[in-house]
């Protein structure tokens, strides 16, 4: 053996010894991050879930993560979350409305005619709003709802928004499709007329900061009354969103709160604006919001009849996530063009939850149709979790699934039916 060859062998042995020593030194951490089959790093769903829900969620992650070797070339699995009271406790739309009223950011409508703010606003509500607010500001300028002089106007606006009735009890809205529209929800972005999306994001950011800083249970002065003054992210849902994204899921938010408002809040769980579907306004050439709303499916922009609400959520998800256009977006798609996972807390989430092909998470807020379907669990894909903060008490009587649990397009109550049209029997509340 030549001296040069001997030197090379000694160098190789030394390098090998250093490599072994390095592996031994990092063994604990290396084991924790050990790739699974196919090169995937194991993603663990965090604690804090009811019963076997964590295990079911872990099964979802393990089976559908994008890097599994049995899913080469497949599109990323889609997960869709509702926002208010699903990812956060309380309602970010409400938080924004209260901030707008407290800070005098709602404008007097054109010609002082409140009927221009919603095609579903009743004449009684339009008159009540004009009586309370008409003398306070010129058309197009902000109303002084955050001052003592504007408190009555703030009270009337808040009554119409929060109770769908005037302060005297008259119905505030009429004539809408109960499966595609909720005019009180839609009224919030419509009252943002005259502001740009950038300005509204600034309002939402200010409201977010206040509501996260306020203690749990806090209230705030709105007009002459008190309103909820705090919001919290659910730690368990933040962790789940993070886990799904690490596992390669394409995670979306679908909400019946205004688009720029949800964009601001979704940043807190790492979801960008391009993965948020909220209520969307049409705009002027200068970018200012109008009172008209963007449509979906066969509904044209400005028709104001298809927001992200029940069947409208299905349409908007099909349109924005899967690129389905026209009337086809209003219908259930093939399994390959549907989310594998969905999470919601209210009847407004029914349709997109039913569309999920693998697992559906329901946060129990005692909503009739939703809980009827979740507890019936006819295909074994539903899981129910109590609210993570201030959970609801157990409902003392069964949900009226067989009689009035379903609300039809015209508002008529009826039985909740399965896909095969059989009636869901009344269900006891067992997860609370």
Image (tube, rainbow, N blue to C red):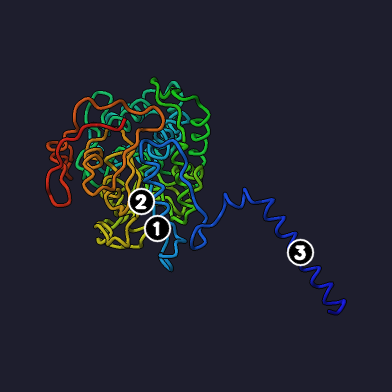
User: Which quadrant holds the N terminus?
Assistant: bottom right
Q: Say which residue label 1 marks.
A: 77
In space, the residues marked 2 and 3 are separated at their CA atoms by 49 Å
Q: Earlier in the sequence, mark 3 or mark 1?
A: 3
Along the line of sight, the residue nearer the viewer: 360 or 38: 38
User: Of the numbered discs in the image, which one, if any, rests on residue 15?
Assistant: 3
Q: Is residue 70 left or right of residue 209?
A: left
Residue 76 appears in which quarter of the rendering?
A: bottom left
User: Of the numbered discs in the image, which one, if any, rests on residue 341?
Assistant: 2
Residue 230 spot, x, y in % from top left: 45, 28
Circles 1 and 2: CB atoms closer than 8 Å: yes
Of badges 2 and 3, nearer the viewer stands 3
Label 3: element kind = helix
Q: Is residue 368 left or right of residue 205?
A: left
Q: Residue furthest bottom?
A: 2
Can you say whether 186 is above or below 251 in the image?
A: above
């Amino acid at each position: 053996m030549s001296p040069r060859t001997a030197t090379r062998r000694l160098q190789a042995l030394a390098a090998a010894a250093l490599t072994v020593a390095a592996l031994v030194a990092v063994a604990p951490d290396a084991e924790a991050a050990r790739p699974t089959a196919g090169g995937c790093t194991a993603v663990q769903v965090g604690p804090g879930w009811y019963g076997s829900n964590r295990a079911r969620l872990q099964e979802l992650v393990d089976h559908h993560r994008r890097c599994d070797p049995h899913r080469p070339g497949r599109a990323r699995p889609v997960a869709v979350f509702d926002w208010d009271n699903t990812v956060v406790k309380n309602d970010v739309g409400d938080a924004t409305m209260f901030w707008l009223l407290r800070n005098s950011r709602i404008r007097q409508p054109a010609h002082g005619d409140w009927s221009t703010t919603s095609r579903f606003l009743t004449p009684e509500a339009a008159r009540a709003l004009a009586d309370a607010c008409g003398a306070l500001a010129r058309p197009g300028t902000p109303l002084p709802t955050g001052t003592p002089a504007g408190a009555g106007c703030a009270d009337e606006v808040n009554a119409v928004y929060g109770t769908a009735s005037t302060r005297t009890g008259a119905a505030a809205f009429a004539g809408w499709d109960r499966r595609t529209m909720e005019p009180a929800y839609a009224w919030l972005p419509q009252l943002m007329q005259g502001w740009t999306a950038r300005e509204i994001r600034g309002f939402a950011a200010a409201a977010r900061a206040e509501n996260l800083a306020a203690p749990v249970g806090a209230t705030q002065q709105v007009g002459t009354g008190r309103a909820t003054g705090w919001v919290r992210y659910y730690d368990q849902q933040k962790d789940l969103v993070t886990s799904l994204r690490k596992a390669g899921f394409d995670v979306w938010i679908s909400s019946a709160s205004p688009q720029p408002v949800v964009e601001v809040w979704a940043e807190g769980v790492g979801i960008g604006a391009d993965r948020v579907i909220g209520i969307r306004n049409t705009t002027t050439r200068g970018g200012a919001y109008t009172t008209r709303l963007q449509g979906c499916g066969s509904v044209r922009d400005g028709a104001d009849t298809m927001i992200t609400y029940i069947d409208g959520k299905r349409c908007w998800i099909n349109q924005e996530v899967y690129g389905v256009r026209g009337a086809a977006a209003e219908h259930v798609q093939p399994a390959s063009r549907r989310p594998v996972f969905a999470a919601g807390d209210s009847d407004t989430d029914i349709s997109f939850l039913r569309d999920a092909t693998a697992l559906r998470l329901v946060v129990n807020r005692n909503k009739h149709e939703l809980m009827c379907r979740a507890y019936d669990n006819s295909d074994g894909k539903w899981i129910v979790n109590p609210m993570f903060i201030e959970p609801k008490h157990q409902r003392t009587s069964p949900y009226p699934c067989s009689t009035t649990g379903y609300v039809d397009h015209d508002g008529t109550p009826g039985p909740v039916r399965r896909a095969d049209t059989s009636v869901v029997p009344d269900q006891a509340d067992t997860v609370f």
